[in-house]
Amino acid sequence: MGEIARRRGSAAAEAASAYGAASAVARARGMRPLELHCLAGQAELAQSAGDTARATTLSGEARALAAQLGFADPFHPPARP
């Protein structure tokens, strides 16, 4: 939902809220790739809103999770076969 809201140009607050809700569900259910996607989306939103400190924090969390999952770059995940 966060990705959809962000791509449609919805208000940043709406997209951030959707990413936050999806991230909470992903964490609770152990869906780490989805959690990674949400963190990366939240980082991009924060960066586009000019919140560099939050973007840096979220990017760091996304990169750490990506490393744990074996992904090279959380902002450019591997293509699906």
Image (tube, rainbow, N blue to C red):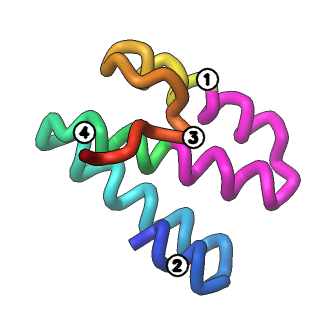
User: Which segment did they paint magenta?
Assistant: 40-59
Q: Amino acid at mark 4?
A: Arg
Q: Residues within 10 Å of mark 4 (few under 14, many from 20)?
A: some
Q: Quadrant of residue 63?
A: top right
Q: Amino acid at mark 2?
A: Ala
Could you say where residue 54 lies in the image, as x and y percent from the top left? 72, 39
Residue on which the image places disc 1: 60
Q: Residues within 10 Å of mark 1 (few under 14, many from 20)?
A: some
Where the N terminus falls, by quadrant?
A: bottom left
User: Sequence order check: which comes first, mark 3 or mark 1?
Assistant: 1
Residue on which the image places disc 2: 5
Q: Are marks 4 and 3 in contact (CB under 8 Å)?
A: no
Give 30 or 71, whichever is nearer the viewer.
71
The circle drawn on residue 75 is 3
Residue at left offset 15%, top offset 35%: 30
User: Sequence order check: which comes first, mark 2 or mark 4?
Assistant: 2
Residue at left offset 54%, top offset 71%: 15
Q: Amino acid at mark 3?
A: Phe
Residue on which the image places disc 4: 27
Q: Quadrant of residue 70?
A: top left
